[in-house]
Amino acid sequence: MKHFKASITVSLRKSILDVQGKTVEHALHSTNFPMIKNTRIGKHVELEIDAENAEKAYEMLSDACKTIISNPIMEDYHIELHEMEA
Amino acid sequence: MRFGIVVFPGSNCDHDAFYATRHNAESESIMLWHKDTSIPKGTDCIILPGGFSYGDYLRCGAIARVSPIMTAVTQHAKRGGYVLGICNGFQILTESGLLPGALLRNSSLNFICKDIYVRAENSVSPFTNRLEQGQILRVPIAHGEGNYFADEDTLNMLEQQGRVAFKYCDVNGNTNLDSNPNGSARNIAGILNEQGNILGMMPHPERCCDVQIGNADGLAVFQSLISAAEVLI
């Protein structure tokens, strides 16, 4: 069994207007950052998981993301896995 | 007619729902705990009340929908029992997949707490049979995530099947951007499931059931349910 640390980013689906991202972007533009574009606000989840290998860990986490961590109707998720030393 | 009101950690409209059903609608009403695994026999309508279940952690309704009682609520709904989700209850119903779509952050990013107007789009459902088609109700809203979202196909299906129960409107019944408080798709304030036994709505009918507090427009929703249950008996 291997031990993994996962970094999961959940963000609104691209097709959905992210009003929070827009507002933050307007604030950035009105300070010193007019060059910033396409601001999206999301959530960051960190967790650890034991699995036989990276594929199995990814599979289980995808399932967890679809079930609870994200709402597939309005959100996308991205998983990054890092194997930890035993 | 017996209502069962589920109390989640963070529910704050449970007692309003109890008062509205017990005292204003003069029905039997019981409180159900979120850790219960069954619903007492003879309970006709489960109310998932408003509030901030589990502190709105992760997403509104996301944790509540895996509460022990939700398995029993789903079975109750599958048997044709009535389920009314108000505000956070509506969010729990979409999170659990019992109703389509999702509730996004209000387009203004503000928590909105005020009286608004809704127009009854359906006058035949168990929740709206005491209303006329197009009847306008004044009902309070109080939410930060009430911006109803669904894809175009789902929205078209909801409208074609008469499953939009309420739309936000102005005092004259006009549905437009100005009368849409939170950015909801097509001004949708409440929707029904395909079988018509589940209603989710963001406005709070339980908060306007008593003439003593100046508005009893919401009482019709509970009276409709009582009428529907009587027909079944």
Image (cartoon, rainbow, N blue to C red):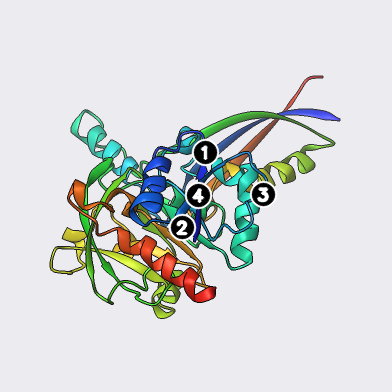
Residue B66 is labelled as none
Q: Residue at x 68, y 47 (%)?
A: A63
Residue type marked 2: Leu
Q: CA distance from mark 2 to mark 4?
A: 11 Å
> Nearest the camera: B231 or B142?
B231
Q: CA distance from mark 1 to mark 4?
A: 11 Å
Is residue A17 something that shows in the picture?
no
Label 3 Cα neighbours within 10 Å, binned few <14 / some 14-19 / many ≥20: some
Q: Nearer the viewer, mark 3 or mark 1?
A: 3
Q: Chain of mark 2?
A: B
Q: Nearer the viewer, mark 1 or mark 4?
A: 1
Per the image, label 3 sits on a secondary structure element best described as loop
Q: Earlier in the sequence, mark 4 or mark 3?
A: 3
Q: CA distance from mark 3 to mark 2?
A: 17 Å
The residue under label 2 is B84
Residues beneath discs 3 and 2 located on the same chain: yes
Residue B177 appears left or right of B87? left
